[in-house]
Image (spheres, rainbow, N blue to C red):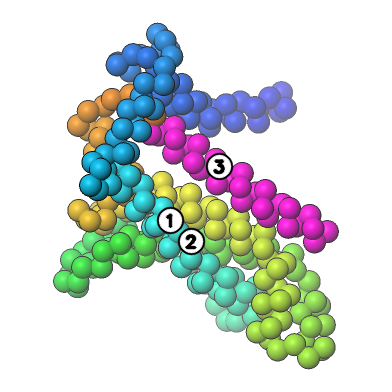
Amino acid sequence: MIGWITPILAALILLPNLVVVVMSFTASTTLQFPPPGFSLRWYAEVWQMAIGDTASLSRLTESFRVSVMIAVMTSVVCVLAGVPASYALVRYPFPGHSAVEELLGLPIVFPAVVLGISLLILVSASGIEFGIWQIIAAHAIIFLPFMIRNCMTALKGVDPALEEAAKTLGASPLRTFVEVVLPLMRGGIASGVLLVFIMSFNEFTLSYFLYTVDVFPLSIWLFQQSNTSFSPAIFAISALTIFFNAAIILIVDAIVGKRDGALQ
């Protein structure tokens, strides 16, 4: 009986994504499931939407570019902050250590709607137009704990004796960290970056409160399109987003897997 639980849970998780992919190939102009026929017409329409005007990028292409830029910059911020923070939490016990670890999890359980409203109030009160950085800061706040948790898990598997041996041989603490610790943490850092990138790329709630006319993520574009004209083309774009996320996961897994294999 227990052996059937995992396949059932996997099916429940994947079923909505499967419906989206199947509907993206429908030949009908209505949202009929199962589709009466299959066609690539909606992918062709998405291609025309992406090309847009010859003089400038279409709104779809621009929103995709903005989402990728936000996800990349959020990942960079989380790496720069998360790796040193995880090292300090694992290697340097201090008073209140447990409390700090618990506080790091607050953004995860804190309602994103409330956090989005709070950040919107702060941005409005400052009177400064931060542009894309206000969304990057919001994403970094809520996704940083995921990066730290992944890095902490990887670092706990690194024997402190290796660092002591490097220092005994004359390596400075910085060189020990860069040449000994970081390579051994590579898997945790890569998984953290992957997780942060995908969640940031698909994040809607925080982006909804902080987007502007010039900073228009793909999730907001999809939301507005689904409100104005719920065309099956929306399913094609959503399916392409699923394929994009899956491709990133496979590429990162292949790169990190090969390097780890070479080390072994």
**Cα–Cα gap, marks 2 and 3:** 17 Å
Name the residue tied to disc 1. Answer: 71
Please tell me whether residue 210 is drawn above or below residue 224 in the rendered image: below
Residue kind at label 3, given as amino acid type: Ala
In the displayed structure image, the side of residue 161 where residue 155 appears, left or right: left
Q: Which mark is residue 169?
A: none
Please tell me whether residue 125 is drawn above or below residue 135 in the rendered image: below
Q: Quadrant of the image for the C terminus?
A: bottom right
Name the residue tied to disc 3. Answer: 247
Specify whether residue 41 is in view: yes
Nearer to me, 260 or 14: 260
Residue furthest bottom as drawn: 170
Would you say the residues marked 2 and 1 are in contact, meaning their CB atoms lie under 8 Å apart?
Answer: yes
Q: Residue at x 51, y 71 (%)?
A: 80
Disc 2: CA contacts within 10 A as few (<14), some (14-19) or many (>=20): many
In the displayed structure image, the side of residue 107 where residue 181 appears, left or right: right
Q: Nearer the viewer, mark 3 or mark 1?
A: 3
Q: Nearer the viewer, mark 2 or mark 3?
A: 3
Please tell me whether residue 171 is drawn above or below residue 241 in the rendered image: below
Task: Residue 63: give x, y in percent of width and height.
Answer: 31, 48
Task: Residue 148: give x, y in percent of width and height.
Answer: 56, 65
Mark 3: secondary structure: helix
Q: Is residue 246 magenta?
A: yes
Mark 2: secondary structure: helix
Q: Which mark is residue 75?
A: 2
Question: Which segment is the magenta one?
Answer: 237-264
**Cα–Cα gap, marks 3 and 1:** 15 Å
Q: Is residue 177 magenta?
A: no
